[in-house]
Image (cartoon, helix red, strand yellow):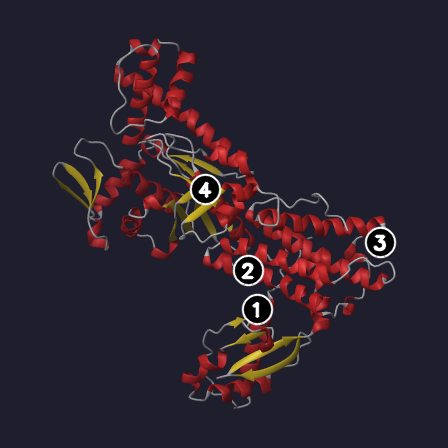
């Protein structure tokens, strides 16, 4: 049986505040005006209570009353609730709430009963959302920037699923266009050179050592048979085969990171099905196509872009924009998705306004297209910086990064900063097995939580913690109460990160929560054979903490180990 959704505490308080305001209006203490949007947040200073609302200030203009007078009317009309231990008014009219310790302790069992679904909501129930991420040209190995997109997209998809949405995870294989031609010519040149030919890699081609490696691998399989063919045809065939091998490598990298996609969509499909041609016709019929200088242009400047953009070059070769427009037409109209989220690298920043203009030209409501641009990743090993340039060959493949530090560390470090922030990825720190490494510290915390349970079972505290019948009212010390408050921050982090589309909040919460648990662990002896009742209550608290940390790690796609060195006890 599915566990009912557990509302975050601030949502429960918001409902209580709404009832109080309505009661004050019915009693004539407040005017009968619509309540504005208001917040219920945790104050920055603990002495101000557990939660505070700004409703009185938000209502002051419409009510034509002083905020403190409004706050007094609301507080006086609040219905009793076992959740609330006290309410006071502070400052200009903030209403501060203090949770009842006994009630808060009793909620621990609800967390354990919810298990892996604790923190899930139905906020996006019924929404069909596609998240497209990584989406690299199959012209070379994936690099760290693609790893950042992968971790970001996968965690965001997990968050959206946890908030009730139906999510499609998609990888767009850019296997059409002029860059594919340049890649094929580059592979052909290395292939011919392997057999003693004097072909040269085009100036705008791909010069990395990996191109030579691909050419040699194909030569070992095919022999020199393609040298007898027309050069253009041979380059196209070698390019196709090399792209298949590169795509297989991209899939392997995603597998190594533990990332699965529902769809691997090939750009070439849009040409094969006639979608590009029909999209071009549609744009022309709507008046968004102009022909000049021998090329076909998208008149995106009429839709707010700073300039028009080429759809088909004067050579007759379609640009990548027209296939991108056809791709989004497929998303919105063929698949009828409610929201499309594209995650792009910083080198695509300039493509954002023209894609928004294209969506408008297709008749898509602007809010349905969300584009997240993540900044670049600089790999560090000590003081050494490595710059990545796929065409010149100066590249550290993502596969080597994963091999060096592990998938979990990759995911955490890629998620640890907001997408719009540049990232320095310290490989030495990510591989370190110490408390200095945040992902190691977090996983160690989970293993310690699981180890406490094993230690208790060895001492005879057996059975499921949720059925132990422990007296949770015994959990009254400051470290216990503080840890319980942190348990209930988790649903709010999930809610905020899902609404804001910012999964880096999960990484920050996981580290802060692990630190909070260790503060509790250092001050409270969990397993005490001389105090079995308190031990039972603390074991419940520990299990709830383990669930919260495991759930946070799961949303990030990071494993939650049950055991690491020296974690029992």
Q: CA distance from mark 4 to mark 1?
A: 43 Å
Q: CA distance from mark 2 to mark 3?
A: 33 Å
Q: Are marks 4 and 1 in contact (CB under 8 Å)?
A: no
Q: Which residue is mark 3?
A: 461
Q: Secondary structure at mark 2?
A: helix
Q: Nearer the viewer, mark 1 or mark 2?
A: 2
Q: Which residue is mark 4?
A: 380
Residue 379 visible? The answer is: yes
Q: Residue furthest left?
A: 293
**Residue 45: image location, x then y, percent:** 56, 73
Q: Which residue is mark 2?
A: 493
**Residue 495: image location, x then y, percent:** 53, 60
Q: Which residue is mark 1?
A: 11
17 to the left or right of 136? right
Q: Are marks 1 and 3 in contact (CB under 8 Å)?
A: no
Q: Nearer the viewer, mark 1 or mark 3?
A: 3
Q: CA distance from mark 2 to mark 4?
A: 30 Å
Location of residue 473 with respect to 110 vertically, above or below: below
Mark 1 Cα-neighbour bin, 10 Å: few <14, some 14–19, many ≥20 = some
**Viewer-proximal residue among 348 and 236:** 348
Q: Residue furthest front?
A: 383
Q: Residue at x 49, y 33 (%)?
A: 399
Q: Residue at x 35, y 41 (%)?
A: 327
Q: Secondary structure at mark 3?
A: loop
């Amino acid at each position: 049986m599915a566990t009912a959704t557990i509302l975050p505490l601030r949502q429960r308080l918001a409902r209580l505040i709404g009832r109080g305001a309505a009661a004050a209006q019915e009693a004539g203490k407040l005017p009968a005006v619509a309540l504005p949007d208001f917040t219920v947040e945790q104050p920055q200073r603990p002495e101000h209570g557990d939660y505070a609302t700004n409703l009185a200030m938000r209502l002051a203009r419409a009510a034509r009353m002083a905020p403190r007078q409004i706050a007094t009317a609301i507080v006086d009309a609040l219905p009793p609730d076992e959740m609330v231990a006290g309410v006071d008014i502070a400052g200009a009219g903030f209403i501060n709430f203090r949770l009842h310790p006994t009630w808060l302790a009793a909620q621990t069992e609800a967390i354990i009963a919810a298990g892996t679904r604790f923190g899930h909501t139905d906020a996006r129930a019924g929404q069909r959302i596609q998240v497209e991420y990584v989406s690299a040209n199959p012209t070379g190995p994936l690099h760290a920037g693609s790893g950042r997109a992968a971790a970001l997209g996968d965690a965001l998809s997990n968050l959206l699923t946890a908030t009730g949405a139906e999510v499609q995870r998609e990888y767009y294989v850019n296997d059409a266009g002029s860059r594919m031609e340049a890649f094929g010519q580059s592979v052909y040149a290395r292939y011919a050179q392997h057999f003693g030919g004097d072909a040269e890699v085009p100036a705008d081609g791909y010069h990395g050592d990996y191109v030579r490696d691909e050419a040699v691998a194909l030569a070992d399989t095919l022999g020199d048979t393609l040298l007898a063919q027309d050069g253009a045809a041979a380059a196209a065939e070698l390019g196709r085969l090399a792209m298949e091998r590169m795509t297989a490598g991209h899939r392997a990298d995603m597998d190594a990171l533990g990332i699965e996609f529902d769809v691997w969509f090939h750009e070439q499909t849009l040409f094969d099905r006639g979608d590009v041609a029909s999209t071009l016709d549609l744009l022309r019929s709507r008046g968004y196509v102009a022909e000049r200088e021998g090329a076909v242009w998208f008149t995106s400047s009429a839709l707010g872009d700073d300039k028009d953009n080429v759809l088909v070059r004067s050579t007759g070769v379609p640009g990548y924009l027209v296939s991108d427009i056809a791709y989004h037409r497929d998303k919105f109209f063929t698949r009828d998705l409610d929201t499309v989220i594209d995650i792009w690298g910083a080198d695509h920043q300039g493509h954002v306004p023209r894609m928004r203009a294209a969506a408008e030209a297709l008749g898509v409501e602007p809010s349905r297209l969300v584009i997240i641009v993540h900044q670049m990743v600089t790999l560090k090993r000590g003081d050494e910086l490595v710059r990545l340039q796929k065409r010149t060959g100066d590249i550290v493949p993502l596969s080597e990064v994963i091999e060096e530090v592990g998938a979990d560390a990759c995911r955490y470090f890629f998620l640890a900063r907001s997408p719009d922030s540049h990232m320095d990825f310290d490989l030495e720190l990510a591989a370190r097995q110490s408390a200095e490494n945040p992902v190691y510290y977090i996983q160690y915390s989970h293993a310690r939580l699981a180890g406490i349970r094993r230690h208790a079972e060895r001492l005879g505290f057996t059975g499921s913690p949720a059925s132990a019948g422990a007296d949770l009212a015994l959990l009254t010390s400051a470290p216990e109460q503080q840890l319980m408050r942190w348990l209930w921050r988790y649903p709010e982090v999930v809610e905020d990160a899902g609404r804001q589309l910012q999964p880096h909040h999960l990484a920050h919460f996981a580290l802060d929560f692990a630190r909070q648990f260790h503060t509790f662990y250092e001050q409270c002896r969990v397993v005490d054979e001389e105090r079995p009742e308190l031990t039972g209550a603390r074991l419940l608290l520990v299990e709830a903490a383990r669930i919260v940390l495991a759930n946070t790690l799961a949303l990030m796609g990071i494993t939650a180990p049950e055991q690491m060195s020296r974690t029992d006890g």
